[in-house]
Amino acid sequence: MEWTTEELALFSRLKNSEIAALTGLAPEEVMELRLEHNQMRNNWPELDPERAA
């Protein structure tokens, strides 16, 4: 699913349950989309913060 800039802005202001209510997605779907967005934004696949030495 592609998110618009406005929808991505919701992540910084709202809880998963609030986003789910606005978008009609299940809270679990919003949680997965937030994680995916954070991984892309923070480059986690290459720079895993838990593996940083």
Image: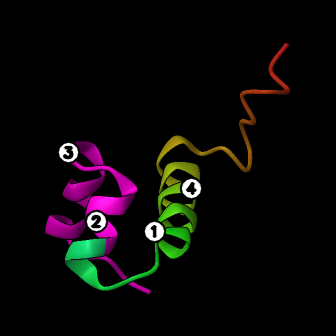
Pick whichever of labels 1 and 2 is earlier in the sequence: 2
Asked if 41 appears above or below 31 in the picture, the reply is above
Pick whichever of labels 2 and 3 is earlier in the sequence: 3
Q: Are marks 2 and 4 in contact (CB under 8 Å)?
A: no
Disc ID at residue 35: 4
User: Where is residue 52 shown, x and y percent of the image?
Assistant: 80, 20
Pick whichever of labels 2 and 4 is earlier in the sequence: 2
Asked if 6 appears above or below 4 in the picture, the reply is above
Give the residue at mark 3: 13
Q: Residues within 10 Å of mark 4 (few under 14, many from 20)?
A: few
User: Where is residue 40 shown, x and y percent of the image?
Assistant: 53, 55
Q: Residue at x 74, y 45 (%)?
A: 46
In the image, what residue type sits under mark 2?
Ile
Give the Cα distance between marks 1 and 3.
Answer: 14 Å
Pick whichever of labels 1 and 3 is earlier in the sequence: 3
In the image, what residue type sits under mark 3?
Arg
In the image, what residue type sits under mark 1?
Val
Q: Quadrant of the N terminus?
A: bottom left
Q: Residue at x 58, y 66 (%)?
A: 32
Q: Residues within 10 Å of mark 2 (few under 14, many from 20)?
A: some
Q: Residue at x 39, y 82 (%)?
A: 25
Give the residue at mark 1: 30
In the image, what residue type sits under mark 4?
Leu
Q: In this image, 43 relative to 22: left or right? A: right
Q: In the depicted view, which residue is nearer to us: 31 or 53?
A: 31
